Amino acid sequence: MGTRKANRRKAEKREDSRLAVVTVSAVIMCMAVASGIKVSSLRAKAEVYQERVAILESEVEKERDRAAELEQYRVYVQSKAFMEKTAKEKLGLVNPGEIILEPEQ
């Protein structure tokens, strides 16, 4: 009888250890699936962010070009040539000794 009890205990221990192995395996599989889903999600986000970075970099380059153009225009606006042109076109002013010829109608 003693051997039957011992055999039964061994069988129960084997079943318990099998159950533990199956449980641990299931948990590991669930963690692997969850990790795979998260990695996939993060890769998709990374692609979106890379596209956004590229767009923003091109916009920054355009704005730098625009700033350079505006700086050139600012320098031109402060020049004597611009002031004379504006005075003639908008105000009708002339330099001393200058004659204005207008076509007859």
Image: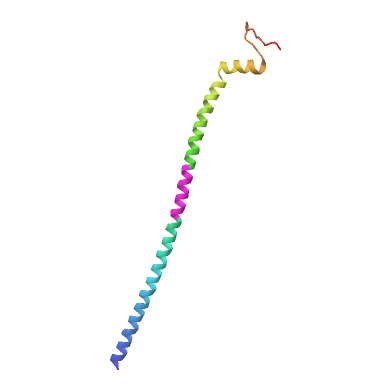
Dominant SS in magenta:
helix
Q: Position of residue 56 (x, y in %)?
A: 49, 41
Q: Is residue 6 left or right of residue 67?
A: left
Name the residue: 29% across, 92% down.
Answer: 2
Measured as percent of width and height from the top left, residue 61 is found at 48, 35
Q: Most extreme residue toward the top, as rendered?
A: 97
Q: Residue at x 47, y 52 (%)?
A: 45
> Furthest residue to the bottom?
1
Residue 15 sits in which quadrant? bottom left
Up-down: is 92 above or below 21?
A: above
Residue 97 quadrant:
top right
Instruction: Give the percent coordinates (x, y) of residue 23.
Output: 39, 74
Q: Residue at x 49, y 42 (%)?
A: 55
Is 12 magenta? The answer is no
Image position of 53 (left or right of 9): right
Task: Give the residues drawn in magenta, as a range.
Answer: 42-54
User: Image quadrant for the C terminus?
Assistant: top right
Picture quadrant where residue 3 is located:
bottom left
Q: Is residue 66 left or right of residue 90?
A: left
Furthest-right residue in this view: 105
Q: Is residue 77 above or below residue 104?
A: below
Eyeballing the image, is 2 above or below 49? below
Residue 60's x, y, as percent?
49, 37
